[in-house]
Image (cartoon, rainbow, N blue to C red):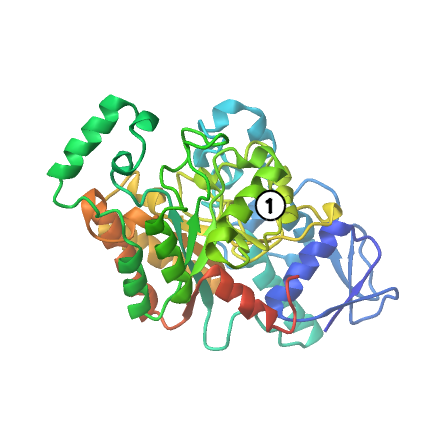
Amino acid sequence: MIKIFKSNLNSEDRYILELFSFFSQTKIHYVDTLNIDVIYFSSEPEDNCIWLYNENAKIDWDIYDPNESSFDIQKSNFLKACAVLIYDKVNKESFENNSNLDKHNRLLYENSFQHKAGYHAYPIVNCIFRIFSQFCNKKLNLKLGTYIPEGKKAIVVLSHDVDNPIKYPAIFSNPLKYGIVDSLKSHILYFLDPNKDDYFNFKIIRDIENSYGFKSTFYFQSINRFTNIGNKHDVTYDIKTKKIRKEISDLINDGFEVGMHPSYKCFEKKENYIFQKKELENITKKNVISNRHHLWSMGIDKEESLIKISESGFLMDSSIAFNDHHGFRRSIALPYNPILPDKNKKLLEIPVMLMDGNFFYKNHQIDDLKDIFKKQLDILKLESGIGSLNWHDYTSVPRSDFYNWGLGYVTLLEILHNDKEVLVMSNSEFNLYIKSLDVNIF
């Protein structure tokens, strides 16, 4: 147990300490009396306790260089540093200038604080917690634990955004939805293509992952672009068709998780989340707890969207990521609540570490992908982190015109299988796991 003087701590400070309590699996007890075994966060030093600097002042980001092995935790103002990172206050001004964003209002990596500070999406919060753990062990003669299971050093969550399982959707739809010319073109291509179903990969993905002993989360959209609330960026498939319903049933019966992939503009109203969640649950016949936004599309005000997700009954989200670069969008590789504490909402964010397009938009060399992923795993193991791997349904198998993407995914699964220090799970498996811990994040 760690004793902390409760004065001078605001709600954000306390949440960072709660997050550290989960990270180290060590309970925190707040006291109102200073003593030699009590940690005191303040702008003014005290001699009769363990003093650490904390103030609403400018943060010296240079000290958190991930290339350095350590820094002076006592003078680092780390509670404030962690808070501004996980609540994305460091990028607030970037969202006020459209030139920093892409057409889907996603922050471009090159315009992010993480890139400009030279962090390269490194999980700085984990690094800070690791050094604070070492400090507590030394000063308080403790041996702090970890939320990672014994014998493991990191956790990777496998996931798939279901965007394009039907290669020629016009074949199975009303021609008026696509236009007569496009529909006719699709029919011709369909009949000429010897591999007309090579985007429909659900069973193959299940078989591959099962062969390694892995399970994953599949995110489905419950409405498509042709509905009255659909958008041209939404999917073309219909979860109510017999073919998709069967795959969803087979996934669930085989121990895989089905999560929701909200429509492109779902974030505009809470009622959209509620409706789409209900539509999906009509198919799954069970509560859907996990969410990930289609195209990472959450509008400009991300927190407002996250609040709507929480209020709609989701327990977990995994929508915060860079689209054009691998690594951790908010410099954290821990499950955390991305909503400010004063909003009093609960949501568990699982950070994304790598999406297929992060790499394959720019490069098709499998050896380069292996190097990037192994470096990410090394970082994740050093910092006791968790990261979500996101490969789309039609890119997860080495066939079709996305052969290299699929080969890349199978290669990463092989790396994970051979690394006995990494635990591989789905979102729902991780949710069950953390409920068993002494210190739960919720």
Which of 393/177 is in front?
177
Tally of numbered tags:
1
Say left or right for 134 vs 215. right
Which percent across, then down, holds residue 112? 50, 36
Say left or right for 157 vs 276. left
Instruction: Please name the residue shown 29% across and 37% down the image.
Output: 169
Say left or right for 399 vs 151. left
Which percent across, then down, holds residue 71? 58, 56
| Image quarter hosting the N terminus | bottom right
Q: Residue furthest right?
A: 33
Which percent across, then down, holds residue 247? 35, 56
Using a 10 Å C-alpha cutoff, classify the residue at mark 1 as few (fewer than 14 neighbours), some (14 to 19) or many (20 or more): many
Q: Is residue 28 visible?
A: yes
Q: Quadrant of residue 343?
A: top right
Residue under label 1, please give it.
Answer: 309
Q: Quadrant of residue 257?
A: bottom left
Instruction: Please name the residue shown 56% across and 50% down the image.
Output: 64
For label 1, the SS is helix
* Above/below status of 203 relative to 355: below
Q: Amino acid at mark 1?
A: Ile
Instruction: Please name the residue shown 24% across and 28% down the image.
Output: 183
Which percent across, then down, holds residue 154? 46, 66
Say left or right for 199 vs 63. left
Which of 239/419 is in front?
239
| Image quarter hosting the C terminus | bottom right
Q: Is residue 122 visible?
A: no
Which of 388/258 is in front?
258
